[in-house]
Image (cartoon, helix red, strand yellow):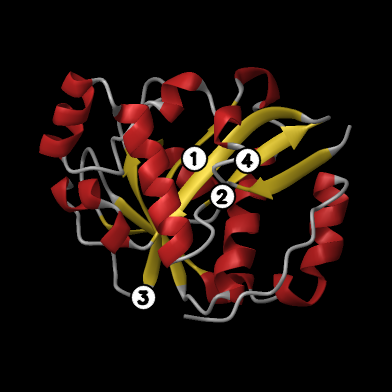
Amino acid sequence: MGRRLVPLTLDNLPDLPRRCRACVFWELDPVSGQAALKAGTPELEKEAWISAVLLEWGSCGRVVYVDEVPVGFVLYAPPAYVPRSTAFPTSPVSPDAVQLMTAWIMPGYQGQGLGRVIVQTVAKDLLRRGFKAIEAFGDARWEKPACVLPADHLLAVGFKTVRPHPAYPRLRLELRTTLSWKEDVELALDRLLGAVQKEPALRPL
């Protein structure tokens, strides 16, 4: 079974589930998000957001393929690019961190370790770009797939709670805890993923 994680671009954006392509929960503030929904333009807004972040900051996501079938994705960006984050009671995201916005794995492919592989791949990318941590808002009352990730899942892949809250705790993964991946991360990921698409090294911002 061939697995690979590919940087998200406008070319493979159509490989995201339709409901996710039309979701601008994180990409717009609540007022602008409602306006986009009323105007029927959320997919255009999503595309514009990804295009802007790619141009200004660089890679902001990965698409997961198994045997060339898209089965999941992850989105992440510095908090300055994520307007919705300021609406959370446990905001703001720390200035030295990148926000893990959301991720999704197709139900038939859950429970196979892909969630952990996604986090490791994002960590590898951000370490290479000079960042110290990943932070995310978790849903402590999670019941079904939504834009906010379940807090329990984040804890299971290595995040720690830095700002508790009964509904939306903020969690953090220190990238220094993954420094040991740097030496043999390619070997580890090759073993986990099969074939990993090689990417050029990115300079720290």
CB under 8 Å between callouts 3 and 2?
Answer: no
Element class at badge 2: loop
Q: Give the amino acid type for the residue marked by disc 3 in the picture.
A: Asp
Report crowding for label 2: few under 14, some 14 to 19, many 20 or more residues within 10 A (C-alpha): some
Sequence order check: which comes first, mark 2 or mark 4? Answer: 4
Asked if the residues shown at circle 2 and circle 4 are in contact, with their CB atoms under 8 angstroms apart, the answer is no
Q: What residue type is labelled 1?
A: His
User: Vertically, is 162 above or below 89?
Assistant: below
Mark 3 vs mark 4: in front: 4
Write down the quadrant of residue 38 in the picture. top left
Q: Gap in Å between the C-alphas at discs 4 and 1?
A: 19 Å
Residue 96, which numbered label?
A: 3
Residue depicted at 73% across the width and 64% down the height: 199
- Indicate the position of residue 75 as horizontal and vertical percent values: 47, 46
Marks 2 and 4: which is nearer the front? 4
- 80 horizontally vs 75: left or right: left
> Local crowd at mark 4 within 10 Å, few (<14), some, or many (≥20)?
many
The residue nearer to you, when weighing 190 against 58, is: 58
**Is the Cβ of the residue at disc 1 closer than 8 Å to that at disc 2?**
yes
Which residue in the structure is indicated by mark 4?
A: 63
Q: What residue type is labelled 2?
A: Val
Number of other residues with Cα within 10 Å of mark 3, as a class: few under 14, some 14 to 19, many 20 or more: some
Residue 143 position in % (x across, y down): 37, 21
Q: How much space separates mark 3 and mark 4, taking CA atoms? A: 25 Å
Residue under numbered circle 1: 153
Q: Where is residue 139 in the image (x, y as percent from the top left)?
A: 32, 37
Label 3's element? loop
Q: Which of marks 3 and 4 is nearer the N terminus?
A: 4
